[in-house]
Image (tube, coloured by chain):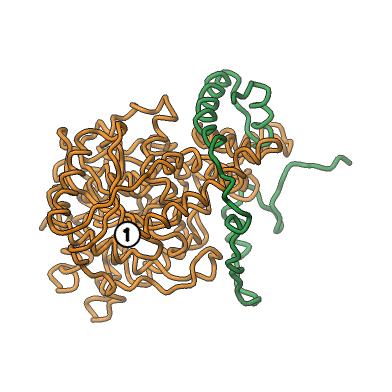
Chain colours: A orange, B green
Amino acid sequence: MKELWKLKYSDIKKGLNSGEFTPTDLIQSLIARIEAEDSKIKAFLSWEKESIVRAAAESTERRKSGKPLSEFDGIPIGVKDNICIENTITSCASKILENYRSPFHATAIEKLLAKGFVLIPRANMDEFAMGSSTENSAYQVTKNPFDTARIPGGSSGGSAAAVAASFVPVALGSDTGGSVRQPASLCGIYGLKPTYGTVSRYGLVAYASSLDQIGPLSKDIDGIIDVYSVISGKDQRDATSKNIPAFDPSKVKELPWKGLRIGKMKITSEIEPDIAKVYESLLAELESKGAQLVDLDFSLLSNSIPIYYIIATAECSSNLSRFDGIRFGQRKDPSGKLEDLYVTSRSEGFGKEVQRRILLGTFSLSAGYYDAYYGRAQKARVLIKKEYEGYFSKVDLILQPTSPTTAFKVGEKTSDPIQMYKADILTTSVNLAGVPAMSVPIGKDSNGLPIGLQITAPALHEDKIFGFAKMISDWASKVELPETIK
Amino acid sequence: MNLNEESLQKIAELSRLKIDPKDIQNFLTDFNKVLNYVDTITELNVSSVSDEDLYPNEGNSLRADKAQEGLSRSQIESFAPSFQNGYFVVPKVIET
């Protein structure tokens, strides 16, 4: 059998539409790949082979009869375990939802199914999307396909590793403070955090509602553009969804180099030297092509992690209060008293990091501390938004490394929550401001580990990000994805 | 600031969580590390932010007040830990 799993998203789409191979051929190749290699990577928590094969067969039939649902019919897509698929377990990699089968589809899933995408659930993640390494999953640690002694990033580490390991050409993750971009960077792929409100959150299990956004991860830019154009657009079922149509991919155009204003950051000691080197050589090349580099002062953004943790944990303490053992999920009832049912179900169901964040959120919302912490963080968030508005009056796009480090070793940061939180130092402010940003692979460090570039644009200007990413696609093509996993 | 064990237990109680006594010291140490880290925001000058900035009037997102089909009882029953005769079963809360 031809090794179709090696193909990138755009070649898969081309091959399906030209009839070179069928969705069934493709899925058989991917299944063989997953069965051979996922024991090393552990990207998936579980997957229902029969229903995946059936969905691909239905797509093959539609294509044979000349009635595909769209040009995407039969394209497989990995799905993070916090996005609801009807009658499929959606555990958020938590014990509290171990056996929870969603009774409905998330809007993003409905839209993908309407176009014929073949869903491949359930990609591993940090429990309830809380983490930067996928070590907080209650079930397994996902490994980085470039080096299995290392983490893939998080919280969408399963989705990123599944794409990098060639299990799926594209996947869905969710990004609250960098959870799509940071793992995309550490796994050498593309990952988009869209403008807040452009992708419905209906059916995405909430971590921090004002920050969460579903986003695609892919080996190539076309996978990101296509999936974003399918899942975006107004949804009546999500009051925070913006009243705008789905993204139109024909808006993506290469930008003129001459006069393109690019905001750059000053390299600090937190950025690894190899990353700084790749970043600065890219900037130098852009300048030689005629782009204008503008130094931006990111000092206010250095506060974004503390602001983020106050706001995100406050929202999580509220959102996760629904997991009380009464209506769904796991119930532990040792004494027959209602209060004990709540406490035991939650204490045994949530992992340590989730509990820590619930406690921090409860603290910052509690009487006596609300003004000093939560109220102040909300005001500081406004300053971050204004800071971005100021930047975008001077520049078209902002370029930064996505992550201060390349993939770190499994266990390296688990004992120190602050070190772990700092993994998102360059990504969290984007969620606080609600603007879009994407990580693009641009090189490797001396250990052969991928380095990602974060491209940030003003709200609703994903087209600029995509256009620019296409312009620097030569850089991305230098990052060969691992064919044989070490 | 630093939280003591008593305050942490109070917050745990509000969160409906119970911290295992053997973990309490580690939890307290980690929690205080995080608290000290986020404490830097108490020094930020936010006086320029007005209430209008904080609560911009973007209008409400409303949909037509029309009845829509929701989940069926059998769907709800399928994921409830304990369900009887159309009700979620909970331990007795009223003394008779």
Q: In this view, does A126 lie to the left or right of A380?
A: left
* Residue A120 visible in the displayed image: no
Residue type at mark 1 is Ile
Q: Where is residue B34 in the image (x, y as percent from the top left)?
A: 51, 30
Q: In this view, does A437 lie to the left or right of A75?
A: right
* Residue A282 visible in the displayed image: yes
Split into 4 quadrants, where in the image is the N terminus of chain B? top right
Q: In this view, does A71 lie to the left or right of A202?
A: left
Q: Residue at x 63, y 50 (%)?
A: A327
Residue A38 image-quadrant placement? top left
Q: Position of residue A362 (x, y in %)?
A: 63, 38
- Element type at mark 1: helix
Q: Residue at x 30, y 70 (%)?
A: A58
- Chain ID for label 1? A
Q: Residue at x 62, y 48 (%)?
A: A322
* Residue situated in front as seen by the camera: B45 or A314: B45
Q: Is residue A472 depicted above or below A481 in this figure?
A: below
Q: Where is residue B87 in the image (x, y as percent from the top left)?
A: 71, 55
Split into 4 quadrants, where in the image is the C terminus of chain B? top right
* Residue situated in front as seen by the camera: A37 or A436: A436
Q: Position of residue A464 (x, y in %)?
A: 29, 64
